[in-house]
Image: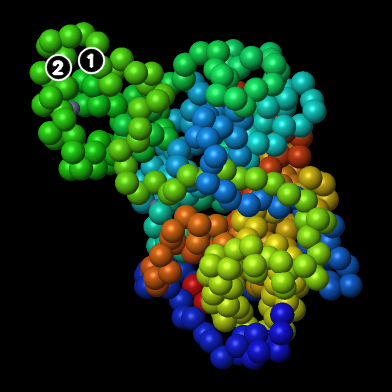
Amino acid sequence: MNMDAIEKLKGVRISSLDDDDDQEPVNIDKEDEDYDDYDDYDDDEEQEPATLGFVEKPKDESLLYRQCFPSKAGGVPAWLDPVNLPSGRSFMCDICGEPFQFLLQVYTPIEKENTFHRMLYVFMCLSMKCLLRDQHEQWKRHPEKPSRSVKVFRCQLSRINPFYSSEPPKYDGSDKPSGSGAALCDWCGTWKGDKLCSSCRRGRYCSEKHQSMHWRSDHKITCQQLKISSHESVCAPNHIGTSVESRKAASNTLWPEFSIIIDDESEYNTEMCEGNALTTSLISRNRIDDTMDSLLGVFQGDDDKKSWAYFQERIAKAPEQVLRYYRNTNARPIWPASSGRPSKLDIPKCSYCGGSLYCEFQILPQLLYYLGVDNEVDSLDWASIVVYACEASCEASVAYKEEYAWVQLYSPSST
Ligand SMILES: [Zn+2]
Ligand SMILES: [Zn+2]
Ligand SMILES: [Zn+2]
Ligand SMILES: [Zn+2]
C-alpha cells in the first residue's frame, strides 16, 4: 500500500447503513477483556500461504454438475447429497424468512473414510438490511437460537455411496450420477420443491414466496397451458418428461455462474503483480482496484490501518482472488480491519460434536464484483466472510450440517 492510500484512509468516512432505530447498539467493546484471544496479525509474523480461489466462466457447463464435484460460485448449488437437502426453516433467512440464495461451494475432500467427498456450501440473504441485523446477532456470544442471514452447510460422503460411482469422474461429459435427486423449486432451482402449485399440480416450490414470485413472473400463463397439456398426455414434454434436476431455475435474480479454480498463493510473488497481472486483465483489474480503494476508505485507527496494510499487501500478489482456502487447521484468515474480528471466544463449538471449529476459508469482497452486485448504498456488501468448520468433520444425523460464518463488514463499530 502506498502513502496516498494511507492518506485516503483518513479522508473518507462512510456512515452506517443501518437506518433502523429500534436496534440495540452492538457491543464490541470486548477488546480489552480478551485481547489475547484475538488472532495475531503482526507484520513480523508472516502467515503461511493459502490456496487461492479465482472465478472463471465454465468452459463446459457439465463440469459444474454434481457428479463432477465442482467448486463453484453463483447459479444453483451442485448438491453432493442430492436427496436429503436442508429443510424446515434451515434454508430461510432467520431475519426476513426469504429462502437463501446460493453464494458458493468448495469441494474439500479429506482422505478419510467418511470424508472421501466433502463439500462446503455458503448461502446468504440478498438483503443488506438482514446482513446488518445479522451483525447484531453475530456479536451476541452463543445465543440459544442464533438468527442469521448467512449460512454454511457441510456435506460429506464416503467413497461407496448411493449417489456416485466410486471411480473418479472423467470430466468428458460422460459422467452420470447413480441416481436422481430430489425435485427442486422451479423458481430458485436451489431448494427442495415439495410444495405443488394447487392449480396445475406441476409447478414445484420450496416456499410460498417463490411460488408467488414465479406466478407473477410467468407461471400464471404457463399454469393454464400445463393444466391443458396434463389432460392430453400424462407425461408432458419438456417439463415432467425431463429429469426434475435439469429444469432451469426461472428466477432472474440468481447470481451468474462461475467455476472456482484454485492456485497456490506461493506461486505469486509481489514483483510480478505490478506488470504481468495488469497486462493480462486490465479491465477487471481496474474495477478491482476501485473495490479495494472504497474498502480502504472506511477503516480508521492505527490497528485498522496496520491490518489493512497487511491485508492489501497479501491480496496484491493476486488481486483477482475471491477465496482464500486454509489447509492447515492452525492457519488464520487475514482481516481487512482489526475491528470487527472475532476473538476465539466468539467462535462457537461444533453444534453436533461439541469439538472446535477451525478457519477453513475466507471469501473476499472481490467476489461481489464478479457476481455483478451493484455498488449502491443498500447493496449487499462485506469486507470478509470467514467460514469456520468442525475440525473433526464429524458425522451427524443430518446430511447437511450447519457450520459457522463470521462476517466482517466495513464499519462494524458504527452499526
Ligand atoms: Zn433476510
Ligand atoms: Zn425456491
Ligand atoms: Zn401451476
Ligand atoms: Zn463436529
Q: Could you tell me the amino acid type at mark 2?
A: Ser
The residue lying at 41 percent from left, 65 percent from top is: 374
The residue closer to the viewer here, 266 or 282, is: 282
Q: Would residue 349 be seen by someone viewing this image from the given angle? A: no
Residue 127, position as x, y percentages in the image: 39, 57
Determine the image quadrant of residue 187.
top left
Q: Would residue 205 be seen by someone viewing this image from the given angle? A: yes
| Direction right: furthest residue | 44
Q: What is the secondary structure assignment of the residue under circle 2?
A: helix
The residue lying at 61 percent from left, 56 percent from top is: 322
The residue lying at 65 percent from left, 85 percent from top is: 5
Q: Which mark is residue 229?
A: 2
Q: What is the secondary structure assignment of the residue under circle 1?
A: loop
Q: Which mark is residue 236?
A: 1
Distance, label 1 to label 2, CA atoms, is: 7 Å
Q: Could you tell me the amino acid type at mark 1?
A: Ala
The residue lying at 46 percent from left, 76 percent from top is: 16
Q: Is residue 187 above or below residue 125?
A: above
Residue 371, position as x, y percentages in the image: 47, 55
Q: Is residue 224 above or below residue 215?
A: above
Q: How is the image coloured?
A: rainbow
Determine the image quadrant of residue 34.
bottom right
Label 2 crowd bin: few (<14), some (14–19), many (20+), radius 10 Å: some
Name the N-terminal-most of marks 1 and 2: 2
User: With 125 as the anchor, is 49 left or right in this view?
Assistant: right
User: With 228 as the anchor, is 390 left or right in this view?
Assistant: right
User: With 46 as the anchor, is 404 left or right in this view?
Assistant: left
